Image (cartoon, helix red, strand yellow):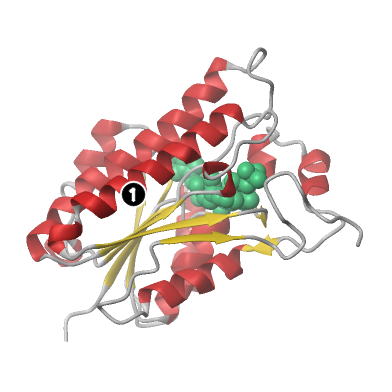
Amino acid sequence: MERKIALITGATSGIGKACALILAKNGYDLIVTGRRKDRLEELKKEVPSGIEILPLTFDVRDKEAVFQILGNLPDRWKNIDVLINNAGNAHGLDPIQTGDTDDWDAMMDINVKGLLYVSKAIIPGMTERKSGTIINIGSIAGKEVYPNGNVYCGSKHAVDAITKGMRIDLNPFGIKVIGIHPGLVETEFSLVRFKGDEERAEKVYQGYEPLHAQDIAEIVEFCINRPPHVVLADLVVLPTAQASATLVNKNA
Ligand code: NDP
Ligand code: 8X3
């Protein structure tokens, strides 16, 4: 029997890494991507024996690199069953009037355009085979807007809209398109948002139990194990302590 293949972007950390490991446990061979090559090499050592893994190092912003690398996959890796568009981050948390345009560029280029480039490289194989599952990691920030979240929320609202658009356009091909929209998940996310300020990042997750990357990976596992006629199209996942993007019951 042919082995199943999953491609996970942003597998060097957090949600992407947890998804890679859970898919490996489910018997998927993995294409894992990210900019940090050493992390991808480490991941190779963590997957169960018997699982094949192809690490690919590129920046999803780099359109040429995305098409060059994903457009020339070895034959053995071409038939991707599951694509998880996960690579992304928030950069900064500033009011619109003082926001940094480099941060805006990063969020739009990575979270939105990077997702589109990777999808554009992978979707033709899925439409040709008339099968596949695409999971886009959005955010509660794609469902609500919160103070100083402006451009990050804009990028994740775009992911939400693009996910819905993909589901409509890919409907004739039997491709499942799933949007997963987490609330607060403790990963390197806040460290990136606050540009390496560990104290500020840690505070985001204090006083309550946030989601863990593993929680999202387990939902991905549930999604990919549904029968062919079932798709969990749109999921918002929050820690129990969180009621909305801005309401978190801390120190309860
Ligand atoms: P992490 O910072 O832990 O992981 C982000 C991943 O994205 C890393 O593997 C990173 O790899 C990759 N990445 C970032 N920029 C690029 C780039 N330019 N090119 C290629 N890869 C890139 O954060 P999370 O795991 O939390 O984030 C994963 C996704 O989940 C993101 O889309 C985020 O917006 C979303 N999300 C996170 C939530 C949270 O609270 N943590 C809640 C809701 C959604 P590398 O740096 O090696 O390139
Ligand atoms: C990450 C969660 O609340 O910082 O998407 O937007 S939040």
Work out whether 100 lies above or below 54: above
Indicate the quadrant containing the N terminus: top left, top right, bottom left or bottom right.
bottom left
Image check: 52 left or right of 10?
A: left
Q: Quadrant of ligand 2?
A: top right
Pick whichever, 155 or 67, lies toward us.
Answer: 155
Residue at 59 percent of width and 42 percent of height: 144
Q: Quadrant of residue 53?
A: bottom left
Residue that lies at the very extreme toward the right in this rendered image? 251
Whole-percent x, y for residue 39 in the image: 51, 55
Work out whether 130 lies above or below 144: below
Whole-percent x, y for residue 249 in the image: 83, 56
Image check: 72 left or right of 225?
A: left
Residue that lies at the very extreme toward the left in this rendered image? 128
Location of mark 1 (residue): 164
Whole-percent x, y for residue 91 in the image: 60, 31
Image check: 89 left or right of 174?
A: right
Pick whichever, 22 or 139, lies toward us.
Answer: 139
Residue that lies at the very extreme toward the bottom in this rendered image? 1
Residue that lies at the very extreme toward the top in this rendered image? 97
User: Residue flagged by tag 1: what amino acid is it?
Assistant: Lys
Could you say whether the residue bearing mark 1 is in a helix, strand or loop? helix
Pick whichever, 112 or 27, lies toward us.
Answer: 112
Residue at 45 percent of width and 29 percent of height: 108
Residue at 15 percent of width and 49 percent of height: 72
Whole-percent x, y for residue 181 in the image: 52, 54
